Image (cartoon, coloured by chain):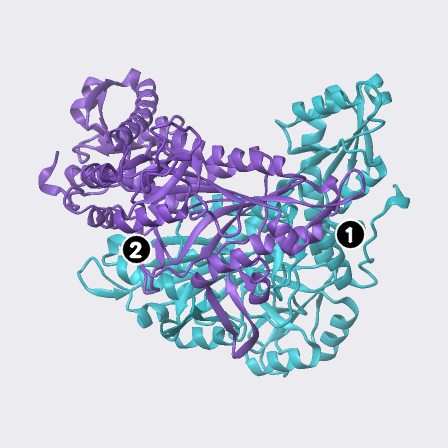
Chain colours: A purple, B cyan
């Protein structure tokens, strides 16, 4: 398949990290800038983000939320109000100390997340039970002062949405926490074709300031896990720190119960590492900026380009269609659009036109089929759905293949070393065991899954009485 | 019209600034935060911005541009590269000096605009004439350290889009500068119902680093002008400073010619001050988050609410419809949706249902009409179009009424004092005259309009030979 023209990427088996870096650069997703740890999201990368954003924004609005926009800066004194929260975030915030030529009397932190500002606002606008629930979301950039960064996966600045909600009681807030985790899972599984495990973070891994954190965890091609979205139940801790109270139906003052939840540009990193291969990106059709790329063959011959443009026009009602009529050789084009992970390629040349057919090539399987023109619409629709399903199925299979059970610590180490992926193992519930596992194996607890299994009654680390099953993995 | 319930705003004739502040607060567009000069854009305000954004983004993409995302921070040394640019922006940037606990070796400025970062990127990705034009845009937040701030009009942080493009030559770049000014004018006139004057900024008022700046200028209800969007031709100044070169068809190295153009959340301030009245906001139908609000009358009576919800369902295919079935009194609801500027109100009670009719009330004229149910669809569509046109016509009339010609300096002062609005007057082209006019009258040159008139041959200020006609006004 045009071997000679291949714009090569490092094979993922040889060096997965380098493969990733090659792909994000060669597929034109990002570029580096001279701002340390910050990336430029290029048109192709941003178009993917826009599609993810549209899908998610739609779901957020459908579940009754409204978008707002909060300030970028948070005064230092305000950040101090919730103790756990500031402790968690202080080491990784950027500080603004000067405006123009003047030194500020109070430092401003560039938001790492916006609980604080939402809380201040909620205190102003919530008075009565009639004001509840308040279901807000914002699309924004946030900054976390990371030491080591990688495009999409960990950057100094990233884009995300952050939901912040207030409820009359714990029950209502907990329902919301679950609802939004399910929205994230739906987005990942049905749009991005990324299977996820749903569960709760341990105390050690939960969000700074939360009562508990729900998470969806996915598995990358190299056997490492990636936290793909989190939904936090904040209890009334922030409400007490900020005095967010309402008068209930009996006229009594009550604290609200809150949630927050976020999904970031990181998910693009997951998409790359779940579906990509040694020829580059593989983008699930539902999220692909271009679902079908038309490559005219022998386009200098009379009628070919007209025919190709005509096809593009006709097919635009059933798919997002592109055409490359540049003077590059077809082999170059094939490689470029394989690198960019475009789900379907359509080739059409003089002979095809004569035979009233075209060639369709699937990015996921490489399969090549000749399709009569009068079957083209239905075939494209069918193939796009098949590709979407196939990517999901492949990802589920990979995860299954790379999920092991460990009943002893030796087994844990062995499975992690030889299989990678998720290790299911029982845990006593003590942070000390988590820490020991991390220290000895680099694996962290990914989640306490909602779907529990009873593998044994002993903690895989200390051998004491097990409390629950945990998924463990090395993680991004 | 429910006088007793009116949630009053200061009359605009009494105190326009206070009227504005009352309206933005009482229509729930914004809230203040404890971050000086930064505003919270509330759901209703943000929904308006989303509609504006969608309309503009569509136009930006249709004219061949692609969205990207650049970093928030710019290293100080990079900012120094273009002399005029840094001189213009340095006094109003926020500086990040610390990341976590560490002091940075180089300060980072929070972007006030992103020419610098786009230029650095363009240098990396542009090599050949085949790479041109590069037509990029980004939606982002920017920060300018303003002393005095007002919601939407002037805030420390604001939201905008900024286009940045590279072209093979001056001609192509100048065409782009004009094209995007026209896109802005189209958005303002046809969507926001705001008439604009198109023209060029004087040397004194142009963008720091530009060869020239095109602008659209609109007139507020109080007779002050508001710059509503700008499009800059940057020449090859940035290209030379950053070394953005390409090899042309003869293999020779050439500098690119660039443009940049931006439109901000400020335009919401314009919409408020062009269309609003003493009952609150008036939102043009094309941009209104809710175009028609259904208020059931005597909703406790059997069948009313069912009927109202049924109507909402049916009308949703022709308009963005809301319904208020809360237990507030109808009069309260009327006032609330008048304050929020919703173009049409639909009232329906038991008697209407019996007579198979509803009541429609226009926000712009207060006109109230009874409409048979079988004419409802066509009437709503017709009325929304009429309201949109009427708002535009009214704004044009206001501008005409408040545009004067001044042939002498005395006349200039007199007209400005007694009419406010735009003063058309001849100008010699010297900055000193601009400065004198500003000093003596507080009016600034708004633009040198593309549609020139020859009012006299003398500069209105110095009496020397006039070069061109300028629109002058006090401005936001």
| Residue drawn at 72 percent across, 54 percent down | B25
**What is the number of the mark on residue A456?**
none
Location of residue A197 (image quadrant): top left
Q: Quadrant of the C terminus of chain B?
A: bottom right
**Chain letter of disc 2 in the image:** A
Cβ atoms under marks 2 and 1 closer than 8 Å = no
Q: Single out the residue that lies furthest toward the left.
A: A4
Gap in angstroms between the C-alphas marked 2 and 1 = 49 Å
In this rendering, is residue A371 above or below B160?
above
| Residue drawn at 50 percent across, 73 percent down | A97
**Viewer can see residue A289:** no
Count of residue discs: 2
Mark closer to the observer (2, 1): 2
| In the image: residue A115, left or right of residue A269 | right
Please rate how many residues cluster around mark 1, counting C-alpha atoms within 10 Å: few if below 14, some from 14 to 19, many from 20. Answer: many
Q: Determine the secondary structure under disc 2.
A: strand
Circle 1 is placed at which residue position?
A: B277
Circle 2 is placed at which residue position?
A: A31
Instruction: Tell which of B413 and A116 is nearer to you.
Output: A116
Q: Position of residue A48 (x, y in %)?
A: 37, 42
| In the image: residue A302, left or right of residue A37 | left
Location of residue B401 (image quadrant): bottom right
């Amino acid at each position: 398949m045009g071997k000679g023209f291949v714009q090569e990427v490092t094979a993922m088996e040889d060096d997965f990290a380098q493969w990733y870096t090659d792909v994000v650069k060669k597929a034109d997703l990002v570029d580096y800038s001279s701002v340390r740890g910050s990336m430029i999201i290029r048109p192709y990368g941003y178009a993917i983000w826009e599609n993810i954003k549209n899908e998610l924004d739609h779901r957020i609005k459908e579940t009754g939320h409204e978008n707002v926009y909060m300030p970028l800066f948070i005064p230092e004194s305000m950040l101090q109000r919730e103790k756990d929260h500031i402790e968690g975030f202080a080491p990784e915030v950027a500080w603004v100390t000067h405006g123009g030529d003047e030194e500020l009397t109070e430092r401003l932190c560039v938001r790492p997340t916006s609980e604080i500002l939402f809380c201040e606002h909620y205190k102003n606008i919530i008075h009565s039970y009639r004001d509840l629930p308040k279901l807000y979301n914002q699309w924004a950039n946030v900054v976390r002062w990371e030491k080591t960064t990688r495009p999409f996966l960990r950057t100094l600045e990233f884009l995300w949405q952050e939901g912040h909600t207030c409820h009359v009681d714990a029950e209502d807030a907990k329902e919301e926490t679950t609802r939004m985790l399910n929205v994230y899972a739906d987005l990942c599984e049905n749009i991005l074709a990324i299977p996820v495990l749903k569960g709760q973070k341990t105390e050690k891994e939960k969000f700074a300031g939360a009562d508990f954190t729900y998470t969806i965890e996915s598995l990358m091609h190299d056997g490492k896990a990636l936290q793909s979205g989190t939904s936090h139940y904040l209890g009334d801790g922030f409400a007490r720190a900020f005095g967010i109270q309402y008068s209930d139906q009996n006229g009594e003052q009550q604290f609200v119960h809150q949630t927050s939840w976020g999904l970031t540009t990181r998910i693009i990193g997951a998409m790359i590492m779940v579906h990509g291969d040694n020829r580059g990106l593989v983008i699930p059709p539902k999220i692909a900026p271009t679902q079908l790329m038309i490559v005219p063959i022998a386009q200098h011959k009379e009628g070919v380009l007209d025919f190709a443009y005509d096809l593009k026009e006709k097919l635009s009602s059933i798919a997002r269609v592109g055409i490359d009529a540049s003077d590059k050789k077809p082999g170059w084009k094939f490689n470029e659009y394989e690198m960019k992970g475009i789900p379907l390629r359509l080739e059409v040349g003089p002979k095809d036109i004569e035979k009233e057919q075209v060639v369709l090539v699937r990015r996921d399987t490489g399969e090549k089929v000749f399709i009569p023109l009068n079957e083209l619409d239905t075939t494209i629709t069918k193939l796009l759905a098949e590709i979407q399903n196939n990517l999901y199925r492949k990802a589920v299979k990979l995860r299954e293949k790379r999920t092991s059970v460990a009943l002893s610590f030796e087994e844990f180490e062995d499975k992690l070393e030889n299989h990678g992926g998720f290790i299911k193992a029982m845990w006593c519930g003590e942070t000390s065991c988590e820490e020991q596992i991390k220290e000895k194996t680099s694996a962290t607890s990914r989640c306490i899954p909602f779907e529990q299994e009873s593998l044994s009654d002993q903690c895989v680390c200390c051998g004491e009485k097990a409390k629950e099953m945990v998924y463990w993995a090395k993680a991004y």
